[in-house]
Amino acid sequence: MVEVAAVGRALDTLKTSVRRTGLLAIAGFLFVLIFYASCTARVLPNQWGVEQRRFGLRTGIVPEPFGPGLYFVGPGVTLHLFPREIHVLDASRRTGAGASDRRSRVLGETTLRVIDALNIQTSDGYAVTADVTLLYSIEDPVRVARDFGWGSLYVESFVMNTFRNGVLTTMGKMNAESFYDEQVRIKAIQEAEDLLRQRFAERGFKVDRLLLRNYQYADAYERSLETKKVAVQLAEKNRKESLVNEEKAKLKQIESRGNAAITIAESEVNARIAKVRAEAELYSSQTRARADKEVNVGAAEAKRLKADALTQAGGRYVVALETAKMFDNIDGAVMTPEQYIAFVRAAWALIGVSAGPGAVPAAGSRP
């Protein structure tokens, strides 16, 4: 019995020692855990770290940001975290819960903010509802922490108001119809982006891109614009038709002038041809007249010369000889009327005398 009691006391002592050791181990683990949780801070790869000191000689915000890593923080020191990735500020008409939840899961709740679409008042008094997206990031987290504090207060206090005012001020210079002009629209977006980039840089942010995704006119302006466009197109159609008619009239005028010129040219050519023909006929008549005159003069001169020759002494013998030859054609001693007429004509031809058709001597007469 004595031995059993000693073993029981030893077991109780062992249990007490094990319990004490276990409690000390748990207490040590909890101490290490509490110390690790309270005296260390982790900065993830997509985060900035900004240290804030509440005690000591240098209190406030440390001017140098902390990159990714595990850091020891002492008592009264807090390491505040800011997202490093690109932030999305989306002014959109589609603000449904489903689309917002999907984008929140992809981009993260701290970097996505969805607001109502911007109602741009144009320079000509019309309203254009625009879906605009701003992509920006934190470039100087220390400046952001000093100006706006911790968390996402910078979005409400600075980003949203600056974004809205910058876009409305810049794009409000356009008139409603200029949204259809690609060059004017892109130029206005670029101007708004440059303005936001300057204002955001002054407060520690960086603007990556400003996007105009969609725009819609008011219903009244849509109807008035449609009516205006139809009127403009009709006026343009009428103007082009008038130009076509003017060109057709000019073409007809040119054709009439051409026809008149052709007629005049043909008349001039015909007149010249008639003149040349008349001159040719006149020249031909004159030439024939001169030729006939020369022929007649030559014939008269030949007759004169022949008559002169016949009046000479030798010419009488030629006449007598020729007369004797004419008597050879007469068969009988008495001439018939026909022979007598032929004889007279031959005699006249011999001496070069031309008689008319009625100048024939009577049959009973003699030469």
Image (cartoon, grey):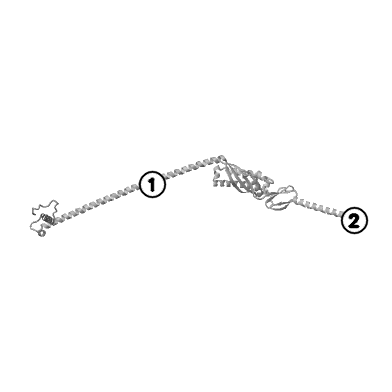
Residue 216, numbered label: none
Spatial CA distance of label 1 from label 2 is 144 Å
Can you give x and y, in whole percent of width and height, for residue 118 in the image?
61, 43
Is residue 284 among the parts visible in the rendering?
yes
Side of 274 where 174 appears, left or right: right
SS at mark 2 in the image? helix
Q: Is residue 317 above or below residue 181?
A: below
Q: Earlier in the sequence, mark 1 or mark 2?
A: 2
In this rendering, position of residue 329 left or right of residue 273? left
The residue singled out by tag 2 in the image is: 4
Q: Amino acid at mark 1?
A: Glu
Quick one: 35 or 51, which is closer to the camera? 35
> In terms of image quadrants, where is residue 162?
top right
Mark 2 crowd level (few <14, some 14–19, many ≥20, 10 Å Cα): few
Circle 1 is placed at which residue position? Answer: 255
**Location of residue 329 with respect to 65 vertically, above or below:** below
